[in-house]
Amino acid sequence: MADPSSYRPRPGEIPDSPGVYRFRDEHRRVIYVGKAKSLRQRLANYFQDLAGLHPRTRSMVTTAASVEWTVVSTEVEALQLEYSWIKEFDPRFNVKYRDDKSYPYLAVTMNEQFPRVQVMRGHKKKGVRYFGPYAHAWAIRDTVDLLLRVFPVRTCSAGVFKNAARTGRPCLLGYIGKCSAPCVGRVDAEEHRELAEEFCDFMAGRTGTYLRRLEKQMAQAAEDMEYERAARLRDDIGALRKAMEKNAVVLADATDADLIAVAEDELEAAVQIFHVRGGRVRGQRGWVTDKVEEITTGALVEHALQQLYGEETGDAVPKEVLVPALPDPLEPVQEWLTGRRGSAVSLRVPQRGDKRALMETVERNAQQSLVLHKTKRASDLTTRSRALEEIADALELDSAPLRIECYDISHLQGDDVVASMVVFEDGLARKSEYRRFQIKGFEGQDDVRSMHEVITRRFRRYLAEKERTGEWSDDEHTLADGDAPTGALKDEDGRPRKFAYPPQLVVVDGGQPQVAAARRALDELGIDDIAVCGLAKRLEEVWVPGDDDPVVLPRTSEGLYLLQRVRDEAHRFAITYQRSKRAKRFRAGPLDAVPGLGETRKQALIRHFGSVKKLRAATIEQICEVPGIGRKTAETIAAALAGAVPAGPAVNTATGEIIEDEEPGTTAGSAGEPVRTGAPDERRGQEP
C-alpha cells in the first residue's frame, strides 16, 4: 500500500486549467482516468487526509504510485480525451460497464444494386439504412420473417446470390414467395429497389399507407371472386399487423429519442436505455457498473453517454436524449453530443406527459436489473472468494492468489509442440492476457523440457520489464541469448504489455516432473516469491515442489473446482492452437516451398495449368506465360517442383476411379470425394 504523499506533486506544479489526469500503479499500469475543469482543484481532493476520503477513493490513491496529467483547451476536448483513454487503458478503478458489446441493427444495403436486408453490428456504413438497435438478433429475424411476405426483398449473401444467378435457380425463399428472386430475373433492379424502399418506409413508421392499400386490394379481389388472392392479401395484412404489434407507438409525432434511467446503491449502479425511433421502442439495452469512487447520478449519466455515443455519428445520435439527472457542467456534454450528431441535440430531464411516463417504465426496468444482478453476483462472489481462500490454505500461501497463470503443453506424437498460458484474475478468466508459445529449444516430445522452456521464456520477459522500469539494477539479472532486449518491451503510454505482471500462483498441467521443471525454471531466474503447483488429471491431485505426497482437496471443494476450470481452459487453449498449426501444415502443398511466391500467384498458376501435376510437366517458357511470373521466378518454380516427391493418384472412394488431373493435396471429406495416396511429406509441406 503506497502513501499518497510519496507521489504528491509539489505546490504550483499542477496547472489551473482543464485537462485529463491518470493515476498509475507501481507497474506503470494506468488504474484511473479522470477529467477536470481545473486540474489543480480536482487533484487536490485526492491528496487530503485519508480518513476524509470515500473508501473506494482511498483504495485507489493507496494503490497508485504516481499521477500525471495532460492539459487541453476546452472541457469538450477533456471529455473526448477521457473517453479515448478509458477505452485504451481499461483502468481498473474507472466506471466499468459489464455489457459493452455492440448491439445489432436491422440494415438495408441501399448502396448495392440489389439491396439486401440483414443483421449488422459495429460501425455504420455509408449508403446503408439502419433500424434499431435491437436487444437480440433473433428479434430482428422474427420481424423480417413477417415482413418478407409483403416486401420480398433479398436477404441472401453475395456468394449465394451469384451462385443462384449462375445456375438460374433461386434459393428456397424464392420458391416459397419470401424473395422476389432478382438473381434469376423475376424482377429487375428498379422493381427490387422499389420493394426495398417500401420496406424501409414501413420500418420507419409509415405503415398506414400500406395497410390501406392492401385492404383495398383484398376487397377488390373478393369482389372479383379471386378468393385465393384475397386470402393471401388477408394473411399479408395479418403479418404486417403482427409486426406492428411488436413495436407499439409510445411517443407521438414520430419522436426519435433515447431514454436513460439509473438505479443505484452505495456500491453499484444499473443503467437502462430505451431507444425510441419514429415514436416506437426499437430496442433496449442495459449495463451494470461498479461505483469505484463517490459519484453523483449526473456523473453516472455522463459516463453512460460516453459509452453509448463515443463511437457513433450522424443519426445514430438522436435529436433528444432524456435522462434522470443532468451532468454538471451540462454545456460541454451537450456540445460534444451535438458534434457527434452534426446538429443540435437536446439533453434534458422529462417533467410531465408521455415522456415522463415512459421514463418511469425505464426506471422500473433499471431497478429490476440491479436487483437481479445483485442476486446473481452475491452467490458468484461468495463462491469465488471461498475458492481462492481454500487454495491459499491448501498451498500455505500468505494471501489469496488473485492472479493465477496456468500452462499446458500440447502436441501430436511429438509434432507441432506448442504451449498455452491462461490467466485468471479474481477467479475469472481474463482472455486478453492469454498467450501462446511455440517450443523452439528442441525437437520431439518432452513435456518436462517444454514446460521448463515456456516458464523460462515467460518470466525472463517479466524480469526484462522489471529492469526497464528500474525496479532492479541492470547487473542483478541478465537476459539470456535469443530473448528480446529491454528496448523491445518499451511501452511509454502505459498499455498492458504481454508479460509485464507477475502471478501469485503458477499452475501447470501435470504431476511432479512438470512441477519440478517449473520450479527449477523460476529458481534459475532468481524468482522465489511466486508459488507453483500442478494438477494431475489421473486423480485430480495437487502437487507442490519438493513434496513426495500430493495435496488432496475434497471433491466438493470450490478451490479444486477453480483449479480444474483453470487447467481445462489451458488445455482447451493449447489444443486449439496445436490443431490450427497442424491444419495449416497439412494444407500446405509443393508450391508453398517456393520462396517469394504469394497466394495470388499460386492461384494464377493453378488456374492457368489446371493442376500441380500439369504445372510440374510444363516448361519454363510455358510457366512464363502466366501473368506476373518472370523467367527467374519460373526457374525457381520448376526447380522446386522437380525436387518435390510427386503425389500418388487421387482415388474416388465411392467408385474406385483414379482421378488423374485433380490437384494434389485433396483429402477425403465424404463418400465420393477423392483421396490422395502416397507422398505424405508433400501433403504436409513445410511449417509456416
Image (tube, grey):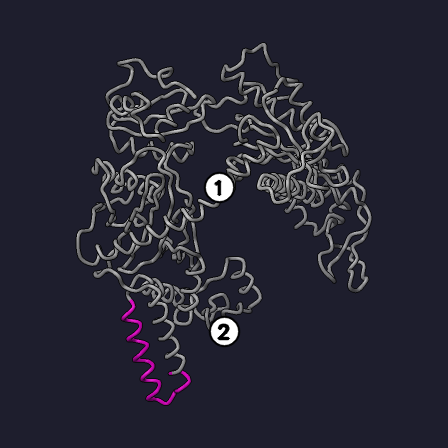
x%, y% of residue 214?
32, 76
In the figure, is residue 141 to the left or right of 336? right
Q: Earlier in the sequence, mark 1 or mark 2?
A: 2
Residue at the spot of label 2 = 176
Distance, label 1 to label 2, CA atoms, is 54 Å
Q: Which residues are magenta?
A: 207-230
Q: Nearer the viewer, residue 529 or 159?
A: 529
Q: Residues within 10 Å of mark 2 (few under 14, many from 20)?
A: few
Residue 224 magenta-highlighted: yes
The quadrant of the rendering that contains the C terminus is top right
- Please, which residue is most extreme toward the top here? 475
Q: Nearer the viewer, residue 356 or 290?
A: 290
x%, y% of residue 197?
34, 63
Q: Label 1 is placed on what type of residue?
A: Thr
Q: Label 2 is placed on what type of residue?
A: Ile
Task: Tell me whether the residue at label 1 lies in contact with that at label 2, contact meaning CB atoms closer than 8 angstroms.
Answer: no
